[in-house]
Amino acid sequence: MTIFKEKLDEEYLTAAEVKEELQSVEEQRAADEDRELRYELARAIEHVNRFALLDAEESRELVERLQELDKVDDPTAHKIADLLPRDRDELRTVYAQERYSLSGDELDEILNIVAEYA
């Protein structure tokens, strides 16, 4: 017997997209005086406010451009959009768990795209 529930759907979001969603939740909670922000929600809002560097539209555009490349899948594109790596070493850490490594040209191509948004 397992206590886990079945995963019905999965969607990747960048920190900027989460920030946008949490801002609407925060506004709804602020409108209702009886409802407080739970600790977890307040910490999540604080986290995305600190670390979301792009706005939601820019981050979506960056993810779409990264997904056009051969070695960038959906989760990796979102991770790159959140971290905005500035050099090859930072980008290599994103690919550290993968079973393949990227060539210098592939790394540079990704970094050139990221540089347009950073």
Image: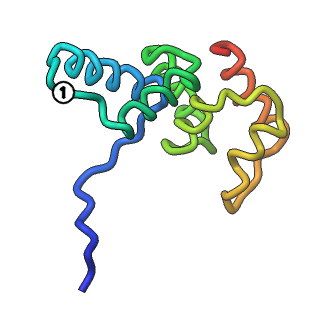
Look at the image and tell me in which quarter the N terminus lies.
Answer: bottom left
Q: Nearer the viewer, residue 17 or 68?
A: 17
Q: Nearer the viewer, residue 104 or 89?
A: 89
Q: Which residue is mark 1?
A: 35
Could you tell me residue 2's position as x and y percent? 27, 80
Answer above or below: position of 5 versus 23: below
Query: Which residue: 66% across, 57% down?
Result: 98
* The residue positioned farthest toward the bottom in the image shown: 1
Could you tell me residue 15's position as x and y percent? 49, 29
Look at the image and tell me in which quarter the C terminus lies.
Answer: top right
Left or right: residue 19 compared with residue 31: right
Query: Which residue: 53% across, 34% down?
Result: 67
Could you tell me residue 76's position as x and y percent? 57, 43
Could you tell me residue 58's position as x and y percent? 50, 15
Query: Which residue: 23% across, 16% down?
Result: 30
Query: Which residue: 26% across, 24% down?
Result: 25
Query: Quarter of the image holding residue 106?
Result: top right
Query: Quarter of the image holding residue 50?
Result: top right
**Dot 1: few (<14), some (14–19), or many (≥20) neighbours within 10 Å?**
few
Classify mark 1: helix, strand or loop. Answer: loop
